[in-house]
């Protein structure tokens, strides 16, 4: 299960590099022709991700069970990579001359790992 999960995300990140590069180039150009070329490259990059990842995402073991069970993904892996908020040791809980303002915990974003899918 874990191997499948990490393998899928390594492929997504490596293949998505082409789409990200095209997106950055498109946002930095003012030339319409160059913009169109970069948008075509973006589309091609996104198709690369789809072609590389869909077979892995729906891969099944010899007995027909999914390579990553829903229980393993949602109950074990996903909680370890979720976003969260916390207070760091050494952070003052109060600020201001009269210590009247209380600091809120810091919100930290976890890795996306294509979690939206």
Image (tube, helix red, strand yellow):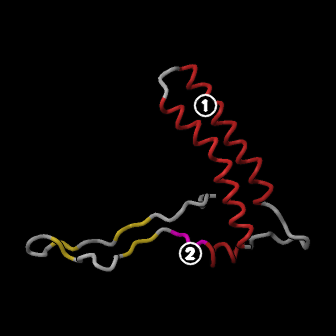
Main SS category, magenta section: helix
Q: Which residue is mark 1?
A: 39
**Percent position of residue 22, x then y:** 59, 36
Label 1 neighbour load within 10 Å: few <14, some 14-19, many 20+: some
Horizontal relation, residue 22 to residue 53: left or right: left
Vertical placement of 8 versus 73: above or below?
Answer: above
Nearest to the observer: residue 77 or residue 89: 89
Residue at the spot 48% in from the left edge and 68% down from the top edge = 83
Nearest to the observer: residue 101 or residue 19: 19
Find numbered disc 2 in the image and state the secondary structure of the residue it sits on. helix
Based on the displayed image, in which of its 4 quarters is residue 20 positioned?
top right
Label 2 neighbour load within 10 Å: few <14, some 14-19, many 20+: few
Residue at the spot 51% in from the left edge and 20% down from the top edge = 31
**Percent position of residue 12, x then y:** 67, 53
Looking at the rendered image, the quarter that the C terminus falls into is: bottom right
Q: Which label sits on residue 79?
A: 2
Vertical placement of 11 versus 93: above or below?
Answer: above
Stretch of the chain drawn in magenta: 78-82
Looking at the rendered image, the quarter that the N terminus falls into is: bottom right
Residue 114 covered by magenta stretch: no
Measure the C-alpha gap from mark 2 to mark 1. Answer: 35 Å
Residue at the limit of the structure toward the left, as seen here:
98
Whichever of callouts 2 and 1 sits on the residue coming sooner in the sequence is 1
Residue at the spot 78% in from the left edge and 59% down from the top edge = 56
Find numbered disc 1 in the image and state the secondary structure of the residue it sits on. helix
**Percent position of residue 80, x then y:** 56, 75
**Percent position of residue 24, x then y:** 52, 37
Based on the displayed image, in which of its 4 quarters is residue 64 positioned?
bottom right
């Amino acid at each position: 299960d874990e191997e499948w999960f990490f393998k899928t995300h390594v492929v997504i990140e490596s293949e998505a590099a082409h789409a990200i590069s095209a997106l950055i180039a498109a946002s930095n150009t003012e030339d319409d022709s160059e913009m169109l070329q970069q948008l075509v490259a973006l589309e091609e990059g996104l198709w690369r991700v789809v072609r590389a990842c869909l077979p892995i995402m729906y891969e099944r073991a010899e007995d027909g069970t999914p390579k990553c069970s829903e229980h393993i993904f949602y109950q074990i892996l996903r909680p370890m990579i979720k976003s969260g908020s916390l207070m760091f040791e050494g952070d003052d809980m109060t600020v201001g001359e009269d210590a009247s303002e209380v600091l809120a915990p810091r919100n930290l974003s976890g890795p996306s790992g294509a979690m939206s899918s």
